[in-house]
Amino acid sequence: MLFRNDKKDNPNQTAAVPLLPLRELIVFPHEVYPIFVGRQKSIKALEVSEAQKRPILLVAQKDAKVAEPSPQDLYTIGTLGVVVQLLRLPDGTVKALLEGKKRARIVRYLQQDDYFQVEAEEIDEVCDRTTEVEALIRSVTSTFDNYVRLNKKIPPEMVTSIASVDDPGFLADKLVGHLSIKLEDKQALLETTNPAERLEKILGYMKSELEILEVEKRIRSRVKKQMEKTQKEYYLNEQMRAIQKELGEKDEFKNEIQELEEKLRRKKMPAEAREKCEREIKKLKMMSPMSAEATVVRNYLDWFLALPWFEYTEDKLDIKEAERILEEDHYGLDKVKQRILEYLAVETLVGQMKGPILCLVGPPGVGKTSLGKSIARATGRKFVRVSLGGVRDEAEIRGHRRTYIGALPGKVIQSLRKAGSSNPVMLLDEVDKMSTDFRGDPSAALLEVLDPEQNCTFNDHYLDCDYDLSKVMFITTANTLDRIPRPLQDRMEVIRIPGYTEAEKLNIAKRYLIKKQREANGLHDENIDFSDGAILGIIRRYTREAGVRNLEREIASTCRKAAVEVVKTDRNAHVKVTGGSLSKYLGPPRFRYGIAENEPQVGVATGLAWTELGGELLNVEVTIVPGRGKLTVTGQLGEVMQESAQAALSYVRSRAELLGLDRNFYQKIDIHIHIPEGAIPKDGPSAGITLATALVSALCRVPVRNDLAMTGEITLRGRVLPIGGLKEKVLAAHRGGIKTVLMPKENEKDIEEIPAPILKGVQLVPVEHMDDVLRRALVLADPEAFFAPKPAPAPVQFEEKSALDGEEQDDSRVSPNLS
């Protein structure tokens, strides 16, 4: 008995013991099992059992995939065992040698946090040695003898060991470990407490296994005969080739087939692909060399043999070197660089891992495409670029089926062949510029390519065979997320790349652009030199962009004109480009630096907008003319911005009394709201507070500060809601000479993304309500007097009106003061 309790005190032979959940293993009495344990609860249970010299209950899990099993995930009957040996390994796991002793049943689970502890009851086995049991033992022993003869995995000495056992329960438990039966069947045998019944079940299992082994023996015999036949055919074919060689016969088509077979033999590829190639070669042998189908089959085989199925480049895992390369090629872009270094660090620790799928979103000219080449160089991988701009056919991604004339694989498979590696850095450029027509949706085809759970079995229509893309590092680029379908966005890790600040552009020009254009135009370091004032002059007065593409063009233009001077005068001439000499090389300035108004004006407010090109300043103009309450909105505004104008007007009407306006002021005037640059479409809710401020300014004849800009969505109650693209908008305000920016209070979390030099030049003021906006935006001699409550208006008298006046009657019900 494993439990040492007195039977008077414990008649049912129960005791509290630690429990060890087992995955895909059933421990039977009288057997010794080595196991590896990694779960902390299980390790604790083993340590308690060993330290206290107590038995441990070994119970199997119903589902081996459950990492943290609960009592409902465990069987109720297991085996009481003892810890024979416990060995702690360097990786934190434990190797234990366990010996099963006796069956036991879980009575109840006891409260214990560190490990499972249960109250267990031993199960006694009773079996009378009848003639029937003796016959059963002999039958089982004899069947096992035949089983060992057919099953080569069991040593013959085991027959002698089994024959010496005469206890039916011990015999049944010893035989179970040598049978290939399911876990559920083993648990059923463990729960069968009658030894005779267990022996009957085991006898049935052994007879089923014997039938399977007999069939396997017959199959092996047939395969052996087939192999002998194949070897004979191979020998005869070799003799035929030798005879043809002696006779001098040359068959180019047969030589080509032999060459294909030789390439296939040397090429490493999946079994499915190899089987397809062998089938196509066999088909090719039966075709005429001049047939069109033979050309199609040859091209198909060429694609299979040219793809890098199991060819990988080794990643450079030196993080310091990768960081040096990324810093050498690009200035700033810290988020992207940090993500690549994180990937290399994890791969260093883990080994093999799936390639990341990144989506770089930002305005043109910030270095998204060139960053892909830099990442490939830093990681030591091949680089391929796939341009998706204007792609509208799904077959461009998945390929065409072989039934079409001139069919080819899709761009993904073509790029892999071009790279010669199955783990390149693949840049999918302009993923937001794809379109859809009757030929399908290419963005839907990209769902499989960019899904880490599916792209390991990417199926190209042309190949009609799975290809593993999980090792490819996909990098997509886009100017905006609006045109990318939501399911496709969900499969990518989006990293936003904002526009550059003036200081960043200055550094990029000095470190990269000037050197690049100097070499491109055949100039030396001593031929041309740019001062900081010249570079800042180009940035401020000759370009207006979030990136540096136009900046590079202007520098290139300056270098070309300097090259003309060098060729005309002296090859060693030195040209010094300063801020004052820019007009000589680039003509008159194209932009006015600081586009804010020169002085506060009535009815004009400065807003901030975000576009694909970065942040922009947005001037809102409001004019009041006599009329009948008509609201006109111009400037090619979208529906959302028009609704913001309606909301702003409703807010002003609700605050009419507080602002000193007549409650029916809108019935005698027409309001015209215009946003300049009417050829450019504009939309979005973030101009709400700008529209409301311009309206109040025009109606109250109070000017708006010219050195202040604002952004935020407005509600009918005057609340200021959060907006997106705060960093780009603040950069635009800084470029435009704005000193103060009013922003929604809920956007305070985004301030940390704005560079510190910008925050020194622009004051950010969080606001929660439209009243706060007006206090700060309007030029008021006494703000408190302006917002002081006015005398209550006379009660509104509602009169019976005709149906034609119904609209006016509804308008008159607006509360004059909602403050």
Image: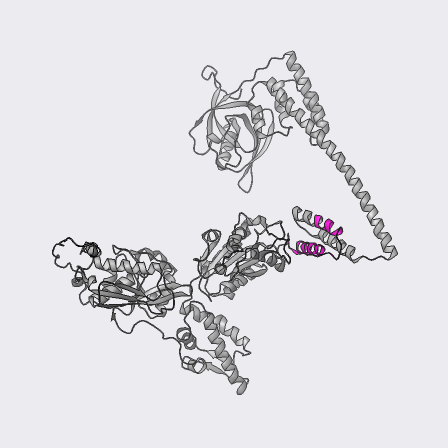
Left or right: 742 as drawn, with respect to 814: right
The magenta stretch is 279-308
SS majority, magenta? helix
Q: Nearer the viewer, residue 99 or 240?
A: 240
Query: Quick one: 437 or 6, which is closer to the camera?
Result: 437
Q: What colour-coding does the image apply?
A: one colour
Q: Quadrant of residue 384?
A: bottom right
Residue found farthest to the bottom? 569
* Residue under the point 49% across and 63% down: 368
Is 284 colored magenta in this rendering? yes
Q: Is 663 included in the stretch rendered in magenta?
A: no
Residue 609: give x, y in percent of width and height. Answer: 36, 64
Residue drawn at x 51%, y 35% as measured from the top left: 43
Quadrant in which residue 185 is drawn: top right
Give the quadrant of the C terminus. Answer: bottom left
| Residue 559 rendering spot, x and y as whole percentages | 50, 79
Count how many numbered circles sit on residues in the image: 0
